[in-house]
Amino acid sequence: MAFTPAKVLTTHHWNEGLFSFTVERPSSFRFVSGQFVMLGLMVDGKPLLRAYSVASPMWDESLEFLSIIVPDGPLTSRLYKIQSGDEILLGGKPTGTLTLDALLPGKRLHLIGTGTGLAPWMSIIRDPEAYERFKQITVQHTVRQIQDLAYRDILESKLKDDPLVAEEAAKQLVYDCSVTKCPTWVDENRRITTRIESGDYPLDPATDRVMLCGSMAMIKETGALLESLGFEEGAQSKPGTYVLERAFVG
């Protein structure tokens, strides 16, 4: 697999188990909003790589990624220690199914994610094309603890400082977050699957389009619920009413 060194620009630790970082974007690196790329480090003289969704918009001069920290993880136990000026390994060929072209036209776009599954949504909601295709875009982010709500301030502000989509986001973007393991959270344990089943989060295949990213359990369960409601999985070769990232599901 071809990869190139990329210099780390910034790091941000959201909590003890979650961090994000930006790296310089190679001049030849091109990607579509929602795609992922392989990245990692040299470990014992060999490249150790994992798939990471690009969280930055496709027009940005840097590339941003969101990662959990697994204390004994072969990659993240090292990756979370990176600092500005260090280098990581970056794959040269982004790919993935979480792209707008994999969806049929619709009125509302629902970006449903758990944990670091928020990353591709951060790229998509800063893409002007998303607001041209859909009248409303909802970011539905479910985490265990309040401190896991990465980018919360940016999302609650509706991207007010974004140079390209601030005006559109102010009118069309909805941020809907849920926390499942915090007793003080108003809607404790209101998982997205529970909300869809109860009708609290209504979805209609005639008008709604859905993207899924996050835990394998959530993706499989929510995908089955969508199928039962009449949604059909799409791909770039055959657009549908919902898509998921199969590279992360297996």
Image (cartoon, grey):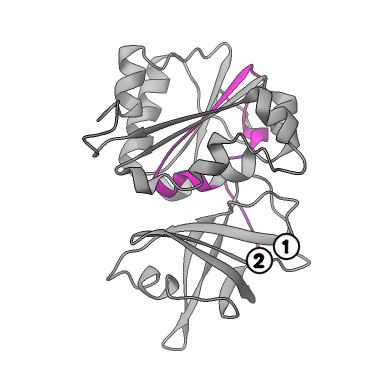
Q: Is residue 232 found inside the magenta-colored segment of the image? A: no
- Give the quadrant of the N terminus: bottom right
Instruction: Find disc 2 in the rendering and name its residue.
Output: 92
Given residues 99 and 133, the one toward you in this image is 133
Asked whether 113 falls inside the magenta stretch, the response is yes
Mark 1: which amino acid? Answer: Phe
Q: Is 165 left or right of 112, judged from the image as shown?
A: right
Residue at 63% from the left image edge and 56% from the top image edge = 94
Residue interval drawn in magenta: 92-119
Please tell me whether residue 125 is drawn above or below residue 132 in the rendered image: below
Q: How many marks?
A: 2
Amino acid carrying label 2: it is: Gly
Which of the pair 67/174 is nearer the observer?
174
Tell which tag, 1 or 2, sits nearer the viewer.
Answer: 1
Seen from the viewer's position, the closer of residues 228 and 177 is 177
Q: Is residue 28 left or right of residue 192?
A: right
Q: Are marks 1 and 2 in contact (CB under 8 Å)?
A: yes
Residue 55, compared with residue 195, is above or below; it is below
Numbered badge on residue 78: none
Q: Secondary structure at mark 1?
A: loop
In the rendered image, residue 130, in percent from the top left (x then y), is placed at: 69, 32
Estimate the x, y position of residue 56 in percent, counting from the top left: 63, 52
Tell me the residue at 31%/17% (across/down). 197
Relative placement, left or right, of 14 versus 37 is: left
Q: Label 1 to label 2, Cα distance in Å? A: 7 Å
Which quadrant holds residue 88? Answer: bottom right
The image's mark for residue 29 is 1
